[in-house]
Image (cartoon, rainbow, N blue to C red):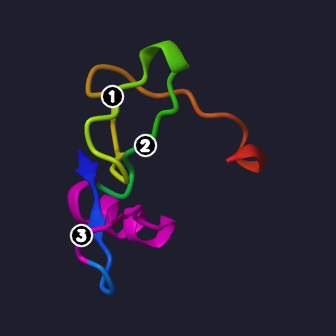
Amino acid sequence: MSVSGKSVVNEKKGITPSWKEMCFIKDLFFHDNEVVLQFHPAKKDYVNIHDNCLHLWRNRKSEIILPPKGYV
């Protein structure tokens, strides 16, 4: 899922969604018990089609192994 926004002050300049906004979108489209990720791939794999756009992803085929709670 891709999420982007527009500035209220200047609609021509995009703004990156905040953590709070990304949590709101996650709650709208995913179940509470689903693990959803935002990736930072290796630079060689970067694809930037739209500035200020963040992506949420979940694995449908297998469970995602999380680090200890103190690291999340």
Which residue is denoted by mark 2 in the rendering? 35
Residue 14's x, y, as percent?
32, 64
The image quadrant that residue 45 belongs to is top left
Q: How crowded is mark 1: few (under 14 residues within 10 Å), some or many (20 or more)?
A: few
Q: Is 2 on the left or on the right of 52, as rendered? A: left
What secondary structure is marked by label 2? loop
Question: Which residue type does callout 2 highlight?
Answer: Val
Q: How crowded is mark 2: few (under 14 residues within 10 Å), some or many (20 or more)?
A: some
Q: Residues within 10 Å of mark 3 (few under 14, many from 20)?
A: few
At a point 26% along the width and 28% down the height, the residue shown is 60
The image quadrant that residue 49 belongs to is top left
Query: How far apart in space, not on screen, are marks 2 and 1 (Cα)?
Result: 8 Å
Residue 43 or residue 66, whichever sits in front: 43
Residue 72 or residue 39, whichever sits in front: 39
Q: Is residue 3 magenta?
A: no
Residue 27's x, y, as percent?
31, 64
At a point 30% along the width and 80% down the height, the residue shown is 10
Q: Indicate whether 42 appears above or below 71.
A: above
Q: Is residue 29 magenta?
A: yes
Residues tagged 2 and 1 counted as in contact (Cβ below 8 A) = yes
Extreme-bottom residue of the structure: 9
Residue 6's x, y, as percent?
27, 71
